[in-house]
Image (cartoon, rainbow, N blue to C red):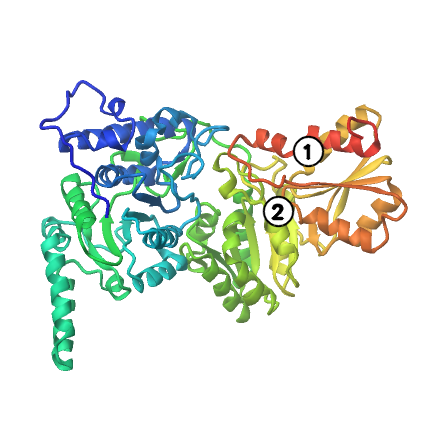
Amino acid sequence: MTRVAEKRDSSPSDLSASLLDSVQGPEDLRRLHAEDLKRLAREIRGQIIENVSKTGGHLGANLGVVELTVALHSVFDTPRDRLIWDVGHQSYPHKILTGRRDAMPTLRQGGGLSGFTKRSESPYDPFGAAHSSTSISAGLGMAVARDLSNESNAVVCVIGDGAMSAGMAYEALNNAGSMHSRLIVILNDNRMSIAPPVGALSRHLTGIVSSRPYIGARELAKQAVSHMPGILRKVARRAEESARAAFGGGTVFEEMGFYYIGPVDGHDLDHLIPVLRNVRDSAQEGPVLIHVVTQKGKGYGPAEAAPDKMHGVSAFDPGTGAPCKGPVRVPSYTNVFARELTAQARKDPKILAITAAMPSGTGLDLFAREFPDRLFDVGIAEQHAVTFAAGLACEGYKPFVAIYSTFLQRAYDQIVHDVALQNLPVRFAIDRAGLVGADGATHAGAFDIAYLGCVPNMVLMAAADEVDLSRMVATAVAYDSGPIAFRFPRGEGTGIGFPENVDPLSIGKGRVVREGTDGAILSYGTRLAAALAAAEELDRRGISLTVADARFAKPLDADLIQNILKNHPFLLTIEEGAQGGFGSAVMHFATNAGLLDRGVRFRALTLPDRFQDQDTPERQYESAGLDACAVVSAVERALGAGPMA
């Protein structure tokens, strides 16, 4: 275990100076006096509020781990000691303390800092993360690699903010508990869901439990017990379990093979730092779990009062916490989905909604206001969510599983095996489909068209506007022949409003939006607006285009595709998804049907075969080649009328 030399000044620093100005990295932090560390924490908290109020981002979770971050970098020898932040959205204080303070104004901006940990960004980020519950698995891998290499550095994983509700975290705990690799897991409990309130007695007991004498005595006792006769061994173990419960609990983690310490007040540096030092310097073998209790939004009144609302925020007034932008006149696609699902649920009591710890992100908080008993938040457990829905479908209910595209990837086996293979009518509402702006590559819904399109029995739809989305919700309600999915993007709709009467769509049927003779564009999803804008521009250049909205990627509208290919010299498909999706399905169909034999040209516009960093949506579409200008260029090349024809 790495031991950091304690280099503390004998007295606090000059109160008129900014401590942050003197901290270029964790090594500077380790020279500060204990009282200075508390001042530093206050300065970090102020800087987070200042920066996030301008850039937007994750606020509450970061405010809650300020003292914990200061303590970890003060005690451990990072980056030699590996510090892994689960999810990564609680890493802003970590970024500030590891040489990225000056770049914080670029947070989540094009060319700027990621909103999550990122290996290419800093040596202090040993593992990239934006999806939850990965830290213990990754940390265990690093710990085993360290042991195989005969190294002695520490590996510390910080997990919490709901991430312990995911099965992967427990798989990792179970595996780690059966091994002897030294691993430190910090359970950041910021909802008081496990621990009782932290008080003076708890502080005293956890100080004892984490101390070297206590740990050493316990290990000696274990060795002694191992030599006792069977009945005495049982009595001794029961006594040890009772004592352990008296010293703060943690039985479930102890049963999984972890040495449990806690709960610890995560905002009390006078308590937290000695506990971390005790664990760092202990000769205890195997994994250790430190249960740290924090408050989400700590130190900022608006975030403390509304931790869920201020978990992720847009730009806001730091004085009041109120968002800077005015009221949105155009509803978001998420709101359109939730509104229509709620309307349908009024007519059909069999409709249920399922979310994986994202009731507000998926709009289902609106559904829950009217039908609280018909919304099920299963926690960060996408795999369970899908199979849970499959069980509901078996019993005649109509479950809607609302999960972001990038998170639904985690439940792929369940989609295939538990839903599609059994042809169960589970409805998938796939939010954040496509590019997502400031959240970058980790949250972009790039792959759902491709990864669902190859699954038998699946019906796939994509909305081009609010009316389409409303009708797709109604279509999913009416469809009982198997699984069905519809995708929609992040952000505001087109502004066309809500339809008065919402009728289901005919399965596998698209629509022609604009007639032309020189070529055709077949759009799947919200790139229809870019296709129509391109068609308008090309019309001014003397090129007449048909523009069609496929609506379905599976089953394809065979009649629509055949008519287009028989009456136009070229077809261009466009989708906000990765290669291997809608365009590939159209090409496969057209080739097998012999529709390209007469020399019809075919082009497919998709997301590029790379991960795109965060930026404004407009710049992301331009970079991806999916904006109206890119469509114009692609059409001209296909007709031999533009550069690189």
Residue at the image position 26 percent from the left and 25 percent from the top: 20
Does 481 sit left or right of 50 as displayed? right
**Quadrant of res 88:** top left
Q: Is residue 502 visible?
A: no
**Quadrant location of the C terminus in the rendered image:** top right
Which numbered marker is on residue 469?
Answer: 2
Residue at the image position 29 percent from the left and 53 percent from the top: 183
Residue projecting furthest to the front: 150
Residue at the image position 59 percent from the left and 29 percent from the top: 618
Of label 2 and label 1, which has the lower sequence position?
2
In the depicted view, which residue is nearer to us: 559 or 306? 559
Which type of secondary structure does the marked residue at label 2 adopt?
A: helix
Q: CA distance from mark 2 to mark 1?
A: 18 Å
Q: Amino acid at mark 2?
A: Leu
In the depicted view, which residue is nearer to us: 435 or 354? 435
Q: Position of residue 331 (x, y in %)?
A: 54, 38
**Quadrant of res 489:** top right
Residue at the image position 29 percent from the left and 39 percent from the top: 78
